Each structure stands twice: as C-alpha cells, then as structure tokens.
Image (tube, helix red, strand yellow):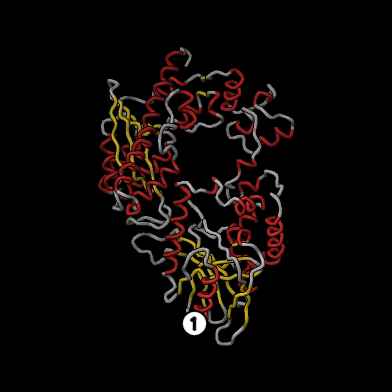
Amino acid sequence: MQSTTARLTDYSVSQGRVRPTHSTAVGLALYLAPMSRPTSTRLSKTRYCAGIQCVKQLWWRVHEPKAPELIPDAALQAVFSRGHRVGELARERFPGGVLIDGEHWAVKEKLEKTRRAIASGAPAVFEAAFVENDVFVAVDVLERRERGWGFIEVKSTLDAKAQHIPDVAIQLHVLRAAGLEVNRAEVMHLNRECEFPDLSNLFAREDVTAQAEGLLPTVPGDIKRMQTALAGELPVVEYGPHCTDPYDCPFISRCAPVLPKDHVSTLYRIGKRAATFVADGISTITDLPADLVLTPVIARQIESIRTGQLVVAPGIGEALAQIERPTAFLDFETIMPAVPVWPGCHPYEQIAVQMSCHLVGADGEMKHLEFLAEGPRDPRAAIAEAVVSACAGAKTVVAYNASFEKRCIEQLAEAVPAQREALREVISRLIDLLPIVRDHVYHPEFGGSFSLKRVLPALVPGLGYADLDIGEGNAAAAILETLLLDEASMPNAEREKIRRQLLDYCGRDTLAMVKLYERLAATAAADPTS
C-alpha cells in the first residue's frame, strides 16, 4: 500500500510574527513581532493542502479539530508511523544537519532555533520553521547550497506525485517571502530498486522546482481564499469528484448524498455509466428499461433485485465439480513495510506473514491449521513450510480472489528455494472461488460487490465479520506490521490479545469459504438444471 507521508499536527502560536532582515554573514535573520491571526485558524502546509482540495474540508479540520472523523484508525496510524520513520531515515542522508525539535505548539521557540541553526552555518536544518503571510511551514530538510538554499519534502511514497506539488509550492512561497534565497525544491521519495540489506539507495530525489514555481502565482490568492473561508461560517461546497481526489476526504459522509436503495451506481462495475443513467432520469436499478443490453452479471443482478430472490445461473454444479476433496481452503495476510527489513525485499513489497487453512477431508471432517509470524525475524521460511504442510494431501486448494494467494505463494517460492517446488505444486492445485460466485449467483444483498464480506452474510446468514475485533483487511495489515516490526510498543498482554484477534480474523476468512462452498453446493444440488 502505498501511502503518502501524512501529518496530524498543525502549528500555531498566540503571538509573534516572523519577518526577514538580511545579513551578509548569515543570509537570513528572523525576529518576532505580534502575529495577526488567531491561533486556531492559522494556515500550515497541511491545512493549505486540505484547502486546495476543498475549503469546506479545511474549515472542518480547523474548527472541529477533535471531530471523530479525524481520529486515526489503526491503518491511518500506521501511515503516520511509517512517515515518521521514513523522515528519520531521510535525515541520516544529511550529515551535520540540525533538528528543530520541541512541542508542536512552541512555534516561537522553533523559529528562534531555526534562526540559530542557519546562523551557525549548519549544512542542513530539519523541520526548519518559518512563518510568513500568516502561514507556518516546517520544512523537512532545508539544505545549504553553494549558492543559496534548497529544500526537500520527504514522502514515504515510491514516486513524486502531482499531489505533492502544492505542498512544495506553499513552502517555496513562505521561504522566499521570508527572504531566503531558495533556488531548488525537491521531493525525496523511496526508491523501488532498493533491496535489503543494502539501504544505501533507499531514497531518490526529484527536482520539482519548475512545477512548484508554476503554482506560485496562485498561492497568494489561495491563501486569501482559505483565510476568508476560515473567518466565516461553514463554506457551501457541493459534493463532487474533489471529495476523493487526490485523497478521500475524512468528512465525505457529511457531504455525500443519501442514495436510494439499489441506486444505479451499485450496478456491478458500472463506473461512469451510472452518471449517464442519472442524467437520463434513471436513479434505481428497478427503473432501468427492460430492453437494456447488459452483461450477464448485471442481468442477474437486476433480476435478483426485481424479484428479491437469489438468482442462480446454469452451470454452477459443473463449476463446483472442479473442487475435489480433500480440500484446503487457504488465506494469507500480508504486510508491506515502507522500509524493507528482510533479505531481498524492496520498499512496499507485499510479504505473507500469516496463513489460515481449513482442511476438509474426503469424509467431510474439518480441521484448522494456522500460522502467524512472531517478532521482527524473517518469517518466510516458516510460513512456506506451514503452507506446504497444510495443503499436503489436498486435491484442491481453494482461495477467494486467488490471484492474491497465488502471488503470495510465488513470492515465497522465490524467497525460500528449499520449498520452491512444493509451493509451485500448491499453485497447480489452486482454484478461485470468487469467479464461481460471480458467474453463477447473485443475491439482492450483494450490493453490486462480490467481496467475501458482502457475499458471506447474504448467502450464509449468521456468519460474517461484525463480531470480530479485527474485521477488515487494511486494519489487519496495519496491526500486523506494528505487531511484528514494532512489538516493543505493545505490552505483552496487549500483544497476545492482538495475536488472538488476528488469528480469529484470518481464520474467519477460510471458514467463510468452507461455509460458502457448502451453500453453493447445496444450491446446485437442489437445482437439476445446474
């Protein structure tokens, strides 16, 4: 999963303002004077970027800083932790650099520390603090150059992205307005070619000066627009594409319209065509014309919704016949560390660290086998052995959306030569249950999705994920990464509790497949045409 470096903290100060005076010895001196805007509404680079996306989102972020939508879940907290770790490693690339530390609210102290660091001749200043035009920025890396200065925005992504440029532009605006001679702006991101244990090329630097300078003419107007919005009542901004571009707005549920049940947007993979239906006055699936040319999947969906019944297509029995007993129902959970930690791994490489297998024997007897890595040790040899052992003797290995499991096994085969042939043999027995469901059945409660979490409770009432403490894949991955690579942050009792929750979640996935297969088999047996 890729993610960009995210920040929770915005900076403010009750009084004081920075203005530049010039010195031939230092190049820049800063002094404090009363600031003109109240603490709660001052812009930062984080707030500026939010305002570029939507001033309504900005208003909520500033005026409702404790809103429940802003409380990070486990997945988002992992993004923040990852960003902090990447930032720390980035600083190591600048020997002699000075870090401007301190509490986030201590802006006056940060400004003074920045002034002293620059005056001392430091080759680089980390989190260098500046305020100008009522905008505070903390620059990830301010780098002294042979002539003037450069600055670097550190991102925990694999590329410099278009959405990074406004972040760079607001910093460039503030630095130059403060009197600093800045002639280069860069984004420093992770290098996908880096391979552990050699982290010497962990980062790549990309010059984005021209792109950032291209935005500079719009920055003063943007600042004024945002400050005006923050000084008034909640802005009126209609729901639209900006709500998810470039990031999902945390307040999207406040703005998104309440759609009627079975809205046309829930048609399977309908995409932008849904907007065409709405423009033509068609809002729900039941309103669609009878002569509409549709895919077989959508045709089943419409029939199911109109009748309120499960629709079963011919051929389901034949499709299920390829699943033979003994059957191993297999599922993996993975982590994607931004900074690789095991030999041969690259940034954000997806690595299987947990496995669940429900094995159904020829006599129908079921047993459960599972594996969950412990601590920061490389788990690939152990999980490879666990997979081979769990699937031994099974005629068919079943997964849901099996391309994921196949990729996990292929990566294990590459990393663990001793199990390579056995793992490849497991792949040869792999059957995907998802297309069997998608191509043969539809239930009104699927809601246009064939994810296991939508299909399972619809076809197997009473079995779902709502009773689990961890019930979603992104959350599981984030918690797994913390559990394995930052175990010191968890007390022993908490660590054991989390391990049990993770095992329950992965085990539910494979039990779900067993029960789903049984329901499909019973449906096929009840229909002689199948």
Q: Quadrant of residue 405?
A: top left
Q: Quadrant of residue 136?
A: bottom right
Whether residue 288 sits left or right of residue 143 in the image: it is right
Whether residue 6 sits left or right of residue 232 in the image: it is left
Disc tally is 1
Q: Is residue 206 visible?
A: no
Q: Give 161 or 308, whichever is nearer the viewer.
A: 308
**Residue at 39% of width from left, 24% of height from top?**
515
Q: Secondary structure at mark 1?
A: loop
Q: Find disc 1 in the rendering and name its residue.
A: 121
Q: Position of residue 41 (x, y in %)?
A: 63, 59
Q: Is residue 134 above or below residue 73?
A: below
Q: Is residue 454 above or below residue 137?
A: above
Q: Give 234 or 409, whichever is nearer the viewer.
A: 234
Q: Residues within 10 Å of mark 1 (few under 14, many from 20)?
A: few
**Residue ranking furthest to the right:** 280
Q: Position of residue 21 (x, y in %)?
A: 62, 81
Q: Is residue 223 visible?
A: yes
In the image, what residue type sits under mark 1? Gly
Q: Position of residue 394 (x, y in %)?
A: 29, 30
Q: Quadrant of residue 460?
A: top left
Whether residue 486 sits left or right of residue 254 in the image: it is left
**Residue at 63% of width from left, 74% of height from top?**
33
**Residue at 38% of width from left, 59% of height from top?**
195
Q: Is residue 268 above or below residue 204?
A: above
Q: Position of residue 208 (x, y in %)?
A: 58, 66
